[in-house]
Amino acid sequence: MLQPAATLEDVYLTLSPEPLLTTEELNAFYKDQLNQVRGDDKVSRLALWLKRTYGNSYYKAFLIGHRGVGKSTELTRLIHKVSDKYLSIRFSAPKEVDPASFKPFDVILIMMADIAVWTAKPIADGGAGRLPDDKRLEEIWEWFADEREVLTKDVHIGGEVEAGAGVSGDSLWAKVLGLFAKVKGEIKYASDRKKEVVDYRLSRISTLVELANRLLDNCNALSREATGKEWVFIGEDFDKGIPTEQIENLFVTHGNIFADLRAHMIFTIPIALGYSEQALQLPFPRESIFSIPDTPVFHADHQAHAEGREAIRSVLEARVSPSLFEEQQMTKLIVASGGNLRDLFSMVGQAADTALLRKSSGGRIASAHAEFAIDSLRREYKQRLGGGPFYKDDTPYVQKAERLLQIYNSSAKAAVPDKVLYSLLRSRAVQEFNGKGWFGVHPLVVDILKEQGRLLGSDPGGTSQQ
């Protein structure tokens, strides 16, 4: 549904937290005001450098940002901005790998499988309409030959060839397709993989990089001949649900893999890694790390940020008609979200459902419905600040509370990154804003500090200040 919801019954149809993926969705829902308020359009900078490197070198960069700022939607914008020069291969790490046990060579194999399959797809479907050269396919087949005896099962071709490939089951292309299908399945469930397979591939990772580069060169050449475009890899969600040690092993310990691959690539990584001292060991230059900040609803002095609120409002009004809110309720929810679109959509959806279920709203979100949704999210933020047996963060709350007050009072020393600050950033209790790099306490957390007597009830910056 690409029109704003006009009834409470339709609100859930337009408030999906999923990223915008199509041109139609971007046209309907994306608003440029967000980047104007954030201070810079990082995607336009990425697009500029991608276009500059087309045909003569390979552009590689990292994208970072806190949860809910819209990184995936911004990557969709990037894909559209460079579509005259590039064909995009987009993959989500948690969907492709076993987060706890994948190995660096798994990412290489995913990229090899994807570029081979996408190059063969029809041009109308985003491919190049060309099969990789037989010599490249033979090299891939032979690389795996030495390890087949230690695989968990034999490579079965027929059932693993992708539907619609348009090739016979016993052709070399069909065999390689089946091999890639089997390998990608193994990568997804890598915890079941035999140790012999892991050791073998790790010992030959340099030869795998060479093999991948020859395939990448071949597929890029085929794409340029057929479409005039090159391939760019968009590797997403390396900052979601993957253990820190796995990310460090991939991008720091084995970072040279990506430095050596002859391909354009943009990866999202944890923001804590992008800002850490280890960032100097990442395979791409420091200036190739782009950060998407939060959208402010308050200034650093806790006064209302009119431009930020209006930018958020423009996004919400593209999805939900203002007529569905009683006076001031849209503003109330915008402030409570702290500018985080994921949280905003969740609260508006919950408020709309509450209004429907109570059947006393006259078809609009009233104050009681908005407060119910805000209270629910505030409890969630309070839980994130705590601890327990399933919390990996062992930072005592007293330290968190002390840092929150320092940040609230704009103490310069409070902005120096350390374990406490990263804990607060991960929980979203603290937000990070624009190119000046200032931090602020989320309005819901300001409410919590007031409840605890750490701030006065009259102090600004909470959800009561609209």
Image (spheres, helix red, strand yellow):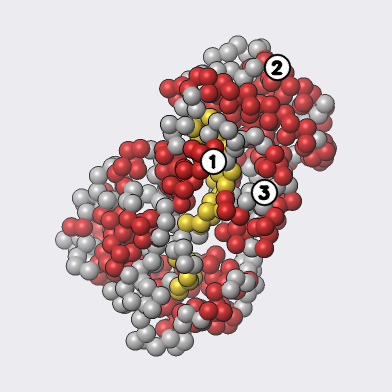
Instruction: Say if 420 sits above or below 258 in the image.
Output: below
Q: Position of residue 355 (x, y in %)?
A: 25, 61
Between the residue at mark 1 and the residue at mark 3, the CA separation in whole angstroms equals 16 Å
| Residue 349 at least partly seen | no
The residue at the point 47 percent across, 48 percent down is 45
In this view, the residue in front, 330 or 416, is 416
In this view, the residue in front, 210 or 116, is 210
In this view, the residue in front, 398 or 418, is 418
Q: Amino acid at mark 3?
A: Pro
Which image quadrant is residue 330 in? Answer: bottom left
Q: Residues within 10 Å of mark 3 (few under 14, many from 20)?
A: many
**Rendered image: mark on residue 418:** none
The residue at the point 67 percent across, 52 percent down is 282
**Rendered image: mark on residue 283:** 3
- Going from the N terminus, do you reach mark 3 or mark 2 first? 2
Q: Residue furthest left?
A: 362
Q: Residues within 10 Å of mark 1 (few under 14, many from 20)?
A: many
**Is residue 239 found left or right of 107 in the rendered image?**
left
Quarter containing the C terminus? bottom left
Q: Amino acid at mark 1?
A: Ile
Q: Circle 1 is placed at which residue position?
A: 234
Q: Circle 2 is placed at which residue position?
A: 135
